[in-house]
Image: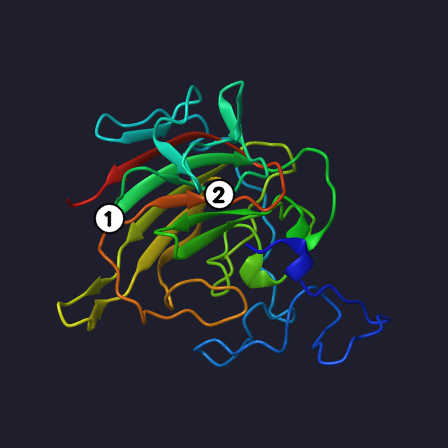
Amino acid sequence: MKTPQYIVIMTVLSVFSPGTSAMAAEGYTDTPKQPDGKWHVHDPNRPKPPIITPGKRFSEEAGAPSDAVVLFDGTDFSKWQGDKGEVKWKLENGYMETTRSGRIRTKDEFGDFQLHLEFATPAKVEGSGQGRGNNGVNIFGRYEIQVLDSYDNVTYADGQCAAIYGQTPPLVNSSKPPGVWQTYDIIFESPIWDGDGKLLKKAFITVLHNGVVVHHRKELYGNTPFRAVGNYNKPHPPKGHIELYEHGNPVRFRNIWIRPLGQ
């Protein structure tokens, strides 16, 4: 989620600056522990998911169902807006590519949904850990599924590709090589509060990464902040925008569609 300058990257032989908590891998040990009490947020010692090879194709270039809203078909940004209005990302050859002009978000808001999108991290590998192909699918601007080049690239488990950022690693690492198109199929259930601000139902999410289930109706702790434990302290409407990040890595996106569920 965060850009490389915010990430603590240390080795055993590093000289540590005062007040810096570090381990022998990228991550943090001075962050709060997650609700289960086992691991710090972005803990470098948290076990990494096993690596598997996904099938060659699953939902790649899948056509949108008749009841879907096509958010991006490779021709224009009509369904999107930038931080300051107009989207200034690159548009070519049927895909959009991030530029240093900030994140983008859908013009429309959605509640419970099924979302399909395809992404490709840079074919030329530069950097390591959180510095490789860093982006994210940020639901309602609060709940992020990480986008990262996690092919032969080690970082903290709750920040690798397909992680619920800062909370839950994917069940497996089903990443494809850099530059290869990958797919996310995401089913999201929005949290619900009553009129007095009492939480009635937490958010749940199911994620398929390249056709592999990596989260199965997983309960979210709350929002997904950097170096902090998420919470539901700020009630919000049952609908919100879908955001795509920009972290200085030229990540590409294509074929994005969404199906509202039960509304």
Q: Which residue is rendered at x = 71% and y = 76% of the image?
A: 20
The numbered mark, 2 or 1, whose residue comes first in the sequence reads: 2
Residue 111 disc label: 1
Foreground mark, 2 or 1?
2
Is 69 placed left or right of 33 in the picture? left
Contact, CB < 8 Å: mark 2 with mark 1?
Answer: no
x, y (%) of residue 28?
64, 71
Q: Is residue 89 above or below residue 103?
A: above
Other-residue count near label 2 (Cα within 10 Å), few / some / many at <14 / 14–19 / ≥20: many
The image quadrant that residue 201 belongs to is bottom left
Would you say residue 79 is visible in this rendering?
A: yes
Q: Which residue is rendered at x = 53% and y = 54% of the image?
A: 172
x, y (%) of residue 17?
78, 75
x, y (%) of residue 60?
46, 29
Image quarter (top left, top right, bottom left or bottom right) of the C terminus: top left
Q: Which residue is rendered at x = 43% and y = 78% of the image?
A: 35
Q: Which residue is mark 2?
A: 103
x, y (%) of residue 207?
40, 49
Query: Quick one: SS at disc 1?
Result: loop
Amino acid, disc 1: Gly
Q: How is the image coloured?
A: rainbow
Q: Is residue 129 above or below residue 44?
A: above
Is 96 placed left or right of 44 in the picture? left
The image quadrant that residue 217 belongs to is bottom left
Q: How many marks?
A: 2
Disc 2 to disc 1, how far (Cα)? 20 Å
Question: Is 36 in front, or is 109?
Answer: 109
Q: Which residue is rendered at x = 75% and y = 70% of the image?
A: 24
Query: Quick one: SS at disc 2?
Result: loop
Amino acid, disc 2: Arg
Q: Is residue 155 above or below residue 106?
A: below
Other-residue count near label 1 (Cα within 10 Å), few / some / many at <14 / 14–19 / ≥20: many
